[in-house]
Amino acid sequence: QVQLVESGGGLVRTGESLRLSCAASGRTFSTFAMGWFRQAPGKEREFVASVSWSGLNPNVADSLKGRFGISRDNAKNMLYLQMNSLKPEDTAVYYCYADTVGEVSPRYWGQGTQVTVSS
């Protein structure tokens, strides 16, 4: 199994930045793509960004391009989400995930971290 723990969320003001981190542990060698989703109150979970194992193919949701960036450090088993110019509509719980091969589950999720952007 793979365990994922997010951190870095909090309360910020409009226009400020945050960097979320996701620490992976367990059978991390079985992971390949990793990424982030978010879920705002009363809304469905939506894709934010993903990155391949190599880190060379970051993919950010079109609506977030230019403000959000994703990266990973495989040596440290870490995934990051850099969020700039935050807006109130970015308020949500942010979840990291890891896609795996040969594991019980093809995708593992973290418990989420709350990001609140005040106007």
Image: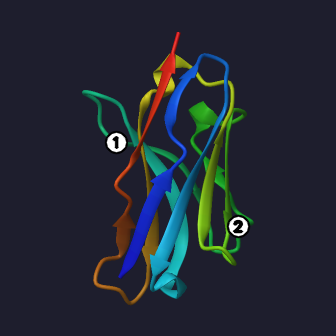
Bin the neighbour count of mark 2 within 10 Å (Cα to Cα): few under 14, some 14-19, many 20 and up.
Answer: some
Up-down: is 26 above or below 38?
below
How far separated are the C-alphas under marks 1 and 2?
23 Å
Picture residue at 44% right of the left edge, 79% below the top: 100
Residue 74 location, quadrant: bottom right
Q: Residue furthest left?
A: 42
Q: How is the image coloured?
A: rainbow
Picture residue at 50% right of the left edge, 79% below the top: 31
Residue 32: image location, x then y, percent: 55, 76
Q: Which mark is on residue 73?
A: none
Up-down: is 46 above or below 56?
above
Q: Secondary structure at mark 1?
A: loop
Residue 105: image location, x then y, percent: 30, 77
From the viewer's perspective, tell me whether residue 115 is left or right of residue 49.
Answer: left
Q: Secondary structure at mark 2?
A: loop
Residue 45: image location, x then y, percent: 34, 42
Residue 111: image location, x then y, percent: 34, 55
Picture residue at 50% right of the left edge, 71% below the top: 24
Task: Pick whichever of labels 1 and 2 is earlier in the sequence.
Answer: 1
* Amino acid identity at mark 2: Gly
* Amino acid identity at mark 1: Arg
Q: Which mark is on residue 45?
A: 1
Bin the neighbour count of mark 1 within 10 Å (Cα to Cα): few under 14, some 14-19, many 20 and up.
Answer: some
Residue 13 location, quadrant: top right
Count of labels shown?
A: 2
Q: Which quarter shows the N terminus?
A: bottom left
From the viewer's perspective, tell me whether residue 12 is left or right of residue 66.
Answer: left
Q: Which mark is on residue 55?
A: 2
Up-down: is 99 above or below 114?
below
